[in-house]
Amino acid sequence: MNTKRITKMALLTAVALILFTVEAQIPAPVPIPGVKLGLANIITVYAMFALGPADTLCILLVRVVLGSMFSGAMISLLYSLSGGLLCYAVMLLLRRVLSERQIWVCSVLGAVAHNAGQMLAAIAILRTTAVAVYFPALLLSGMVTGLFTGLCAQEVLRRLRKA
């Protein structure tokens, strides 16, 4: 790795952690476990299209681990990691067929995959399928927040390419 690449990855990881920390201060929009804005995912979606899969995976893993440490809730590491990796896999596949004008589509489907990964982790950790009652609400919120983060990532990519 060269210095420029490492610096770019470190900067994006820092921005993602800042967004994660800021979002943690915002009250949950609805009283359903797992529903949040996912602002740090703007960076993940941006990185997938701007930097590529390897760098994105590094940024994602560092953000998830450090975010769990910063929040003091290490149990959230399992939920975030399972959701993040499933989201990453979906975005990796979609990256090959979608253009930069369709980043928002990639983000929506990635957010849905993220929520599915979190639900699978919850079922495994809690050893009950009763938590699946939250899945429809998580899917709906994932589509809405995925659209928002995708449009933000698309705009960031567009503006930074001009700069």
Image (cartoon, rainbow, N blue to C red):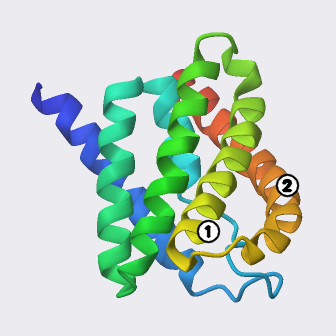
- Can you give x and y, in whole percent of width and height, for residue 48 in the image? 49, 30
> Which residue occupies 58% across, 48% down?
42
Residue 144 placement, left or right of 150? right
Residue 135 placement, left or right of 23? right
Give the SS element for disc 2. helix
Residue 114 visible at all: yes
| Relative to 136, residue 23 above or below | below
| Relative to 2, residue 127 above or below | below
| Relative to 36, residue 100 above or below | above
Who is closer to the viewer here, 146 or 154? 146
Residue 83 placement, left or right of 113? left
Residue 12 visible at all: no
Q: Residue furthest top?
A: 97
> Which residue occupies 67% across, 19% down?
100
| Relative to 124, residue 6 above or below | above
Q: What residue would you read off at disc 2?
A: 144
Who is closer to the viewer here, 98 or 77? 77
Say which amino acid is labelled 2: Val
> Which residue occupies 66% across, 75% down?
128
Q: Residues within 10 Å of mark 1 (few under 14, many from 20)?
A: some
Q: What residue would you read off at disc 1?
A: 123
Circle nearer the N terminus (1, 2): 1
- Can you give x and y, in whole percent of width and height, for residue 104 in the image? 75, 34
- Can you give x and y, in whole percent of width and height, for residue 102 in the image? 76, 23
Q: Quadrant location of the N terminus?
A: top left
Question: In the image, which is nearer the foreground, mark 1 or mark 2?
Answer: 1
Give the SS element for disc 1. helix
Say which amino acid is labelled 1: Ile
Who is closer to the viewer here, 4 or 137? 137
